[in-house]
Amino acid sequence: MIIKKFQANTEKEAMVLAKEEMGKDAIVMNIKTIAPKGIFKLFRKPLVEITAAVDENVTYKNERPKEETTLPPRRNLNPDIIYEEDEPFEQSKEKAEASSAIEEKLNNLQNLLEKQLNAKETIEVKKPKAPEPNKNIACIQLIYNQLVSNDVDEVYANQIMNEIDGSLKKDSSIDMILASVYQKLVLKLGQPKTIELSNDRPKFIFFIGPTGVGKTTTIAKIASKYKMEHHAKIAFLTADTYRIAAVEQLRTYANILGLPIEVIYTEDDMKQAMDMYADYDIVFVDTAGRSHRNREQRDDLENLLNSVAEDKREIYLVLSATTKYRDLIKMTGVYSDIADYNLIFTKLDETDTVGNIFNIRMLTNAPLSYVTIGQNVPDDIIKIDSQSIAKKLLRGH
C-alpha cells in the first residue's frame, strides 16, 4: 500500500490533488487542519492536509516514494464504495455525530496499539540480541482481539487477519495495517441492495422473518419514504392473519398514508391482488412471523412467495441485531431453504456491537439492505453504510 499526504487551502482542493496524483481508488485515511507556526502565525491562514492511500497493485498517474502516517482510515475517495449524501435514507445529524465519536475511538485504538508495541520493544532491548520478530504479528493480534470483542465470529476474524498478513510487508506501520483491515471489512460488507423503482410494474416486496423483529413497522418506514420522496403508487398486502394486532397496525399506517390495503389468506387471494394492483409501482407484502422449527408454516410461506414470479418479486429477511448469533444461524438457514433474500437488521439502536451484521453477511452472502435505528416512522431507517459498520467493528466499547 502506498501512502501520501497532500496540502491545500481547502479540503476540496486537497482531495482534487489526491485524485489527480493517486487515482480514483485512493482511500482518505485522515483529514486535519495545520495551524501556522512562528511569530507570523496570526497573519497566515491554516492549511488542510489529507493523508491518502492506494493499493500497490493500482497504477496511478505520478508515483512517488511512500510516506507513512499514524492515523486510521477515515473516508473513501472511490465512488464505487462511498455513498452520496443526497440519496434517500441519508444519515441524520445524530448519526453524523455518532460517526465522529466512532472515529475518535478508532484513534484511541491506534494509540493503544502503539503504546503496547513500544512497551514490547523497550523490554526486548534489555534481552540478549536475537532475530528481530515481525512487528505485524503483535498488531494483527490486537486488531483480531478487537474484532472478536465486537462479536465478530472467530472464523471470520481469522480469515481477515490471514488475508491481511499475506499482503503486508514486514514491519508495516500500524496505520497501514489498520487501513488494510478497514478496507477489507468494507469490501466484504459490500454495497447495500435497496428497493428501486422500475418501469416493469408492479414490484412485489415481501418481508419475511421471525415474530417480534419489527417487520410491520419497517414496511411502514420504507413505504413512507417512497411515497413522500418518489411519489410512488403503493399498496399494502398482509398475510399475517395469525395476529389481529399486526393487521390493525398495518391498516393504521395505510390509513395515515392514504394507501389501499388487502388481507390475503390463500394463494388465490394473492393472484387476485396481483390483478387488482397491476398498475401500481410497489406492493409491500407483510407476512406472519414463522417459527423456523415448524415445517408446515415454512411450506405455507414458500407457497405464498412462489405465487409471484421471481422477476416480479424481491424478498427481504428482517432480523434483529440483538438476536444471539447461534439463533441467527438457524433462522437464516431455514429461510435460505425457502428463497433468496436481502438482509434488513432492526433495533441497531439497542445494541453496542455490530458483529452479527458482519457474521450473517459472511455466512449467507446475502446483500445487506437497511438498518433501523429507532421506532419513529419514517425517519429511523437508513441504508446499510459499510464504512460506518467497519469503523464500529474496529472501535473500542
Image (cartoon, rainbow, N blue to C red):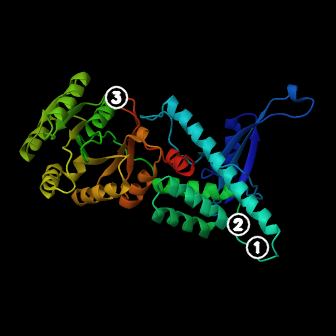
Query: Image quadrant for the N terminus?
Result: bottom right
Disc nearer the start of the sequence (3/1): 1
Q: Is residue 141 placed above or below 275 in the rendered structure?
A: below
Disc nearer the start of the sequence (3/2): 2
Q: Which residue bears the numbered disc 2?
A: 135
Residue 239 percent location from the top left of the image? 15, 41
In the displayed image of the protein, which residue is found farthest to the right?
39
Q: Nearer the viewer, mark 3 or mark 2?
A: 2
Picture residue at 46% right of the left edge, 34% below the top: 90
Marks 1 and 2, Cα distance to the nearest angstrom?
Answer: 9 Å
Residue 141 percent location from the top left of the image? 60, 63
Q: What residue type is labelled 1?
A: Glu
Marks 3 and 2, Cα distance to the nearest angstrom?
Answer: 50 Å
Q: Is mark 1 on a helix, strand or loop?
A: loop
Picture residue at 26% right of the left edge, 41% below the top: 212
Residue 327 percent location from the top left of the image? 31, 55
Q: Which mark is residue 377?
A: 3
Q: Which residue bears the numbered disc 1?
A: 132
Picture residue at 85% right of the left edge, 29% below the top: 44
Residue 339 percent location from the top left of the image? 24, 56
Residue 172 in sight: yes
Q: Is residue 78 placed above or below 276 in the rendered structure?
A: below
Q: Which amino acid does label 2 sit on?
A: Lys
Which one is nearer the viewer's eye here, 44 or 347? 347
Q: Is residue 336 placed above or below 75 in the rendered structure?
A: below
Q: Is mark 2 on a helix, strand or loop?
A: helix
Q: Which amino acid does label 3 sit on?
A: Val
Residue 202 in sight: no
Total numbered labels: 3
Q: Which of marks 3 and 1 is in front?
A: 1
